[in-house]
Amino acid sequence: LGDVYKRQEYGYVIHKLDYKNCVFVLGNRNFTPLELLVKNDENCELLDKVYIGKEKRDKIQNINKWISENEFLEVNKIIVYDAIQKIILDNEQKYLDYINLNVDDELHKKTLSQGFRLGPKTTDKILIAKNEKEFNSLKDLEERAKTNIFIKNLIQKIYNEISGKDKLRIFANKAKHL
């Protein structure tokens, strides 16, 4: 799914620091949790999408650091889940490609079952539907596999990867361990 150290282009604000003009964001490529310094005359709200790439930035002055596990775990989980969902939907093809191109044998079946916390019946339904025809959206996956938990479980998997609870990291960079 690409280079884990690939530069993030955008991030979604997941936390505002009261004591300085900084925000925490999740980067759009690998969910990299970062602390950013906001320009003095700018304001960022929760779940705002901000540009953090190499070109001139509108709201962000500087990328301060990759945030730690402890800092990440202090952030409101509901806001983080919403940000993860926004990033997934912004990059939906990336996750479809993972399922359509990579998940087809027993090894991947086990990864799909354990990593995404899907039961064996749901896993089989996804594989059968995928083998009939590749999925064209995550909604299509859920409809054809007759499940309403795949996206929710994908969000939970990514959260666990960031927080270090899931050792099998497929989609996300882990918060820094200090």
Image: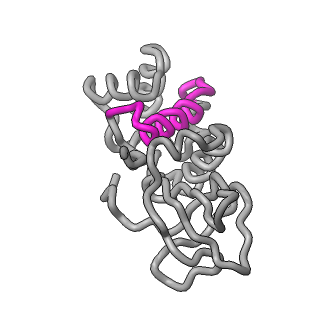
Q: Position of residue 31 (x, y in %)?
A: 48, 52
Q: Position of residue 122 (x, y in %)?
A: 49, 19
| Relative vertical location of residue 111 with respect to residue 49 in this rendering, above or below | above
Name the outermost residue toward the front: 19
Q: State the image quarter where residue 60 is shown.
A: bottom right
Query: Measuring 58% from the left and 39% from the top, which residue is drawn there?
Result: 140
Name the outermost residue toward the bottom: 56
Instruction: Inspect the magenta stretch and tell me whether residue 19 lies in it.
Output: no
Of 163 and 83, the residue lying toward us? 163
Q: Quick check: 26 left or right of 30? A: right
Of 149 and 87, the residue lying toward us? 87
Q: State the image quarter where residue 170 is shown.
A: top left
| Relative vertical location of residue 154 with respect to residue 109 in this rendering, above or below | below
Q: How is the image coloured?
A: one colour
Of 80 and 73, the residue lying toward us? 73
Instruction: Inspect the magenta stretch and tell me whether residue 160 lies in it.
Output: yes
Q: Quick check: 21 left or right of 68? A: right
Q: How many marks?
A: 0
| Relative vertical location of residue 33 with respect to residue 121 in this rendering, above or below | below
Query: Measuring 53% from the left and 33% from the top, which residue is drawn there?
Result: 156
Q: Main secondary structure of the magenta part?
A: helix
Q: Position of residue 72 (x, y in %)?
A: 52, 45
**Which range is magenta?**
144-167
Query: Measuring 47% from the left and 21% from the top, which residue is drawn there?
Result: 118
Q: Position of residue 125 (x, y in %)?
A: 47, 22
